[in-house]
Amino acid sequence: MKTSSKLRAALVGALTLGLMAGGAATAFAAPGDVLNPQANGSKGSFFLWDANTGDYVDGNTARVYTRDEALIASANSTDVLSEINPAATRPVTGATSFTQVLRFISAKTTADLNGGTNTWKSWSVDSAAGPNGGTLTPDFTLDAFGAGVNDIVAAGGSYYYGVAYTINNGVTPVGAVYREINITAGSGNYTVSPVEVEAPAVVAVNTTTALAASPTSLDAGNTTTLTATVAAADASTVVGNVEFFKGADSLGSVAVSGGIAAKTVVVGTAGAHTYSAKFVANANFNASTSADVTVTAVVPAVVMPPMAPSDNALNASTAHGATASYNATTHAATLTVDAANNGSTFHTFVYSTATYLGDFAVAGGTITADVSMLDAGDHKMAITNTIGDVVAWATFTKTDAAIDPSFTKQINADVANAQTPADGEFSLTNLSGSVVNLTNPALVNGQSVVSGELGNFKVTDLRQVSKPGWDLSTTVADFTKGGDTIAKSALGIAPKVVSQAGSGATAPTMGAAQVSGAAVYPWDFAELAGSAFSGVSTYNADLVFTAPAGKPAGTYSSTLTLTLISK
Amino acid sequence: MKFNRPLALSVAAGMAISAFGVANTAFAEPVSQSYVVVGSDTLQDVLNGLANGTSVSGASVRSTAGTMAIGSFDATGTTSIQTKPSGPRFGRPNGSGDGVKALSRSIDGAPYTSATVGSPAAVVITGQVDIARSSSGATQVADGALRYIPFGRDALSYAHSGGSNTAFDNIDQATLKGLFECTITQVGGVTVAPVVPQSGSGTRKDWLSKIGVTEASMPEVSEGGCVQVGQEHDTTTLSNGTPFPANAVTAMSAAQWVAQNTGAGINRIGAGVKIGSPVAGVLPTTGSGTATAPNPAFYSNTTWGRDTYIVVENARVTVGDAKYDANLANVVSTAATKLGNITSSLPGQAGSVKKKYGFLAPTNTTPFRAALAS
């Protein structure tokens, strides 16, 4: 059962309300009570009334008030004389005493609220002089909030306004109730945001479910309709679902509409079948289960045809003037008899081999029956009463061949969209800068050696259909400084793989590292053989530059070019 | 505010008491933030309550003019007052007649001299007074410059210091007339000291009219007669500072009597002073002490009940007039907290405050126009 936790406490025994220390948030609030504190921090709230008529005006939160409209406030929405912050509970100030009562308007910040007359935009003196020691029907006309109202109206905007209880001559509030007021600049027309009240607790209502099946006995293979009727204990409209069961097996759920949920089921096998319906619990309604209902299915009896008159019973004396005809369109034979037989029902047979067609009533002096199953040729058609006497018979000629019983079904088959893979991107992307500085050379065995990294770059090959493969070719120019040259063979490159990705991709083969001093360019940094694609490969390389002996010190520059060539 | 004058001065010469020797401390009331109210003693306490803010009805009520506070000046206090920023000091209007006169001079700009003894003479007070308190009405004039707005219903009776002498509790109209014309001198076997409120008081004017006496037919002591001059609604001292005599009979507003007893108004009740009634069997008030309340049966009496008014310049509260002042119109309107309100269904309405001060709703609720007072 779903109950608000606050309500549950109130239902347990006789708890006395209002015993808490004054000023605390209201425990055990009942639905409709003003929340204390409000979301904006106000210690409870107030409601607005017409100061001239005493009418409650706070029911419409969209209402626009004028600045000189005479209003008063009270602590609840039902009693205009309900005082704000009455003794002894003091919901606003609690155990803290106060010396002044002021109506105020402030900006909507904690600092402005708590600063009293030092920070408020406007205020006016009020009192706690009601019969219960609280503030009685304070003047909530906007113009009654002090001289600062004119500046507030000129500026417009959203503020807090309400009643504060203070010490220190108004600079220190010790408790306040306030609501948000939204003022239109210039006119001073305003609206007031609503008061938060305790939402009503949702108490789930009990239900009852009754189940009926129709029919309750039938031929196996036929259907029965299960009808569940759900009623709420408080006669309210039930909203929810009913789940049907055969024994313990679920047959599925149906939504309740107008108190009813129904489901038609096939009773396939002979025997007694037990059905039940269960209303599924939800937030507003409790579950209930119906009594079991038994549906009995029997294997349908095969009705043997009645005895047919023998062939020689069909003679001149039993024809009784009947005639027969065949309709090739409807594949039906019609026996025309004495109109005195109208309304009576007879067994109907056709011959050569006596074939029982069924029981038919004579209407308009005729009986018509389907004879599509007969071969082409002459046939006799006879009708008998229940005792077996031949009432009438005649001969007709069937012109078309026997028609086999058949039925048709349309088959609809869905086919998935035809799709085929396609080739994707083929590109070379520099992921780092355009200049590599190899700095801080060291002398190793008398030679200047300096090293560094090439910087990340990316090869993208998503040609998953054509898979031609590729070469990543590297060319390096000779290094020059002014008129001095160092051959490109001085640059050693050792490729390294940073990452390799792609579903179905093949990792390329990396080129053998070039040794500094013996490097040969052009050179393949990496290669991918045909019939494969490499996906996305990110590479870097370690560079080593060894200057030959005798070269002057300084910075020598060259250009390195990487080119991605498809095979 | 009421001062006790420390020096007893001779009155034999019948001269006006001059300003010298009066211990007039340098005490100034603040000027008004907006509009100024002067005049009747009867309405002084309730107008103070509404103008300054009061919670006597249980709720805080203050009659503001839009967002601005107004200023109400007592009938007695310092000899002269300044009512507005950078305004002139002029004689304090003392009483209804004086208040309406001051309002009229504020409108027409002719020089004003207050009825308060010792006040400066012939001061131009244009624009210094906006609202007059009046405990009596005026002759209706269709296009008069003044507008009398019904404020509340008071009733006029008398207070007496006759003590346990029950004859003083019910003195009928004819006897009262004789007492104030000095043709009847005794009630209940003792000599009566009739006391009339000061000149310029609306209560004085109303009282004489109700008992059928004229200024001419009323011999004051200064004229060789028997009638002494007191301060309106004050049964502790006379206007010359001497104590209120024993066996005295003086006009007393029933509303003032209620307010002075409940604490809503300043208590100026002399020791042992009681309220009497000229109507046999109907007292002006019910209850005693803080539970004193107006008696509607007496207030509704057409002879003794009286509607009181606040008075303004008609043009300034008439929409469409060039002089129309929306904020002045606002403060004298009949809306819940304003001076003209006479409903008492909710504690925050001015009518509820007025009731605590002894005023019921006026019988005639329609404002009327009158000429400027000369």
Image (cartoon, helix red, strand yellow):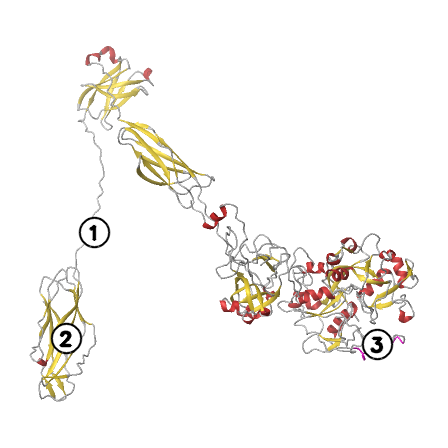
Q: Give the alpha-carbon distance from disc 1 to disc 2, as whole Å.
A: 49 Å
For badge 1, the amino acid type reads: Asn
Say what amino acid the circle numbered 2 marks: Asp
Looking at the rendered image, the disc whose residue lies closer to the viewer, 1 or 3, is 3
Report the Cα–Cα distance between label 2 and label 3. Answer: 120 Å
Relative to A455, A291 lies left or right:
right
Residues at discs 1 and 3 both on one chain:
no
Provide the secondary structure element on which disc 2 rests: strand
In the picture, the quarter occupied by the N terminus of chain B is bottom right
Q: Are marks 2 and 3 in contact (CB under 8 Å)?
A: no
Q: Position of residue B311 (x, y in %)?
A: 73, 66
Give the amino acid type for the residue marked by disc 3 in the picture. Ile
Q: Secondary structure at mark 1?
A: loop
Identify whether B307 is placed above or below A395.
below
The residue beneath circle 3 is B17
Residue to which mark 1 is pinned: A417
